Image: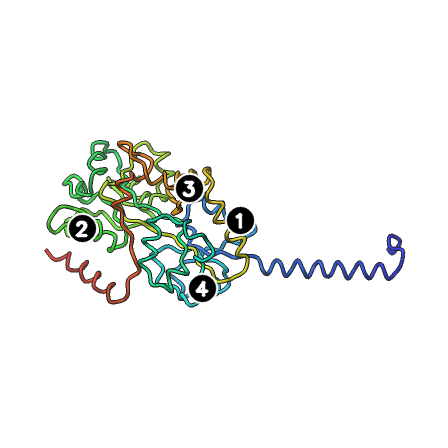
Amino acid sequence: MFKKYSTRRQFFNYGKLSLLFLLNSCINTSKKIRISMQTSFYPKYFKDNLPASWQQENINFSKLALAKNKKQLSNSDFILINDGWINSINFENFQNINNLFPNNLLNNKSKNFLNSFKDYERNKLFPIGVVPYAVIIKNNKDLIYYARKSWDFLLDEKLKGKIIFPQSPRIIMSISKKIDSKNSLSKLKDQAMLFDDQNAINWLVNSQASVAIIPYPLCVRYLKADTRLSIAFPDKGVPLIWSFLLSKSKINNEVLINWIKSFENKATINQLANQGWYLPFNNEYSQNKYNINFKNNKFGPSKMCWENSWSFLPINAKEKLNLENLWIQSLTP
């Protein structure tokens, strides 16, 4: 057994080195970077672009009271979260992050949205993507022209009981304000078949529904596979979903910066836009994705649509109650 070692001392020294190597490996493993996100909100290419050495964790922000999600959140180095769940986190648990990146990295749209937040929140939120809602129409090519112009088409008598709306009353109320009709919210609700986000495209494909309003990334692959489906982004704008990166740790800032920089190459920008995900960065190639002007755009929102689109800030309990009351009042004839 000892023949390969000239002395007993060499054998024990080799053993010590092996033990140190093993301990060092364990330490490195325990420090593996963990990033948590609600994976259903992110396109495949985005998730595939995460560094291979990072540990991806799926977290449900609507169930943070559960012990499992609490522990996961506390153990994560980085968090990806969309604007709808901002109120579910405690900003005191996160580090300032925007100072790690050049001031000119973000485009004006993301800067303007960030400026709507309070200072202590804004410094900890880094916009990493924006997703537009899309209108998906089944078996009705004639309707596409009107859908690309405005939201008024939703009140068409032929669509009564055939529209799948998002679950969020706030989104539906915001769309109703874009419709040129008295009592537009009540009329919209009369047009509804059901209210669903995650399963909207399945309902559209497998039922008598004619229209679904859905986040763009959730319908891209269906558009490619089902020739019955068409897409429209009204010129009057669409609701937007923003995703933010937050950091709970000061470690590996260089790794984080390099990851953000990796999004700036043309191939990545193209792949993400093709999956309905737009980078909020100021480089020319990213900005070109927001400046599409050709007629009957089939590949994403036009420049006019982007200019008229709107975002949602987190709301407090009182504002939420007011919205709920408005929603209930719209049921009254």
Q: Which of pointers 1 and 2 lies earlier in the amino acid sequence?
A: 1
Q: Residues within 10 Å of mark 3 (few under 14, many from 20)?
A: many
Residue found 41% across the figure and 60% down from its top: 124
Q: Which residue is mark 1?
A: 51
The residue under label 4 is which amino acid type? Phe
Q: Quadrant of the N terminus?
A: bottom right
Q: Which residue is mark 4?
A: 94
Q: Which of pointers 2 and 3 lies earlier in the amino acid sequence?
A: 2
Relative placement, left or right, of 177 versus 130 is: left
**Of circles 4 and 2, which is in front?**
4
The residue under label 2 is which amino acid type? Lys
Structural distance between the alpha carbons of marks 1 and 2: 42 Å
**Tag shown at residue 272:** 3
Structural distance between the alpha carbons of marks 3 and 1: 16 Å
The residue under label 3 is which amino acid type? Leu
Q: Residues within 10 Å of mark 1 (few under 14, many from 20)?
A: some
Proximity of marks 3 and 4: CB atoms separated by less than 8 Å: no
Structural distance between the alpha carbons of marks 3 and 4: 27 Å
Q: Position of residue 278 (x, y in %)?
A: 38, 44
Numbered disc 4: secondary structure = loop
Using the image, determine if residue 42 lies above or below residue 14: above
Q: Which of pointers 4 and 2 lies earlier in the amino acid sequence?
A: 4
